[in-house]
Image (cartoon, rainbow, N blue to C red):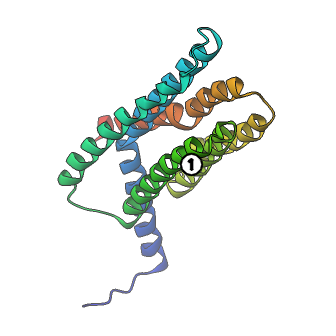
Amino acid sequence: MVEENFSPEQSLKVIHSMLERTKQDFSDNSFYLILWGWLIFIAAISQYLLMTVFKYPQSYLVWNLMWVGAIISIVRSIRKEKKIKVKTYMGETMKYFGIGCGITFTVLAFIFIYYNIWQFAFPVYFLLYGLLSFVSGAIIRYVPLRWAGVACWAISIVAVFVKFDIQVLLMALAIVLSYIVPGYLLRAEHKKRLNEN
């Protein structure tokens, strides 16, 4: 194996190109932010309406919509994985960070169901949305995602002091800020890059 010596300038260029490639991959995958954003937004608004307007006692059933998102995400990622020719360290890190967060959300749902402690669910989820957004934004150097993370942390604090039905509405707000808006911004940047090439 031949060891290559890079100058500091060449090293910075390699690092910069890796970050740009990761950001581009993340932009390409804005589909997931938009998909999950809209599914969670629809579920949150639906649960709020079922609880407050229709007084339906099993309003939580709307969250079964998440299984649709899981199936779509798994099928799409398997198809996309087969097409990828070059994998980067940063891209793989982002992928596994996203998978890890998804598994964490799912496990937490089972814990909240088992112990029947839903009054704690949304503040905890807001914390995780904040972490996911902030770290993703830091890795790909994308400021809107970092600000989305900070906003989710603030929403998490507010959620502790309000009733459950308001927490459900805050979920809709948090998901707009952390998934839907960044997802569409990244998609727009991706389309702009494609048009420039």
> Does residue 109 appear left or right of residue 188 in this picture?
right
Which amino acid is tagged 1?
Answer: Ile
Q: Quadrant of the N terminus?
A: bottom left
Instruction: Find residue 94 and report its horizontal and vertical position in percent.
Output: 43, 57
User: Could you classify mark 1 by the number of other residues whose Cα lies within 10 Å: few (under 14), some (14-19), or many (20 or more)?
Assistant: some
Residue at image point 63% right, 27% down: 168
Where residue 71 sits in the image (x, y, percent)? Answer: 30, 39
* Residue of label 1: 111
Q: Residue furthest top?
A: 53
Using the image as rendered, state which of residue 65 and residue 111 is in the foreground.
111
- Give the quarter of the figure containing the C terminus: top left
Image position, residue 173 (x, y; %): 62, 28
Height in image: 99 above or below 63? below
Say which quarter of the image contains residue 160. top right
* Residue at the image position 56 percent from the left and 29 percent from the top: 176
| 156 sits to left or right of 197 | right
Extreme residue toward the right, this view: 161
Q: Is residue 128 visible?
A: yes
Residue 39, relative to residue 26: is it above or below? above
Callout 1: SS: helix
Q: Residue 13, located in which quarter of the rendered image? A: bottom left
Q: Position of residue 27 (x, y in %)?
A: 40, 43
Which residue is found at the position 59% from the left and 44% from the top?
A: 112
- Say left or right for 156 vs 13: right
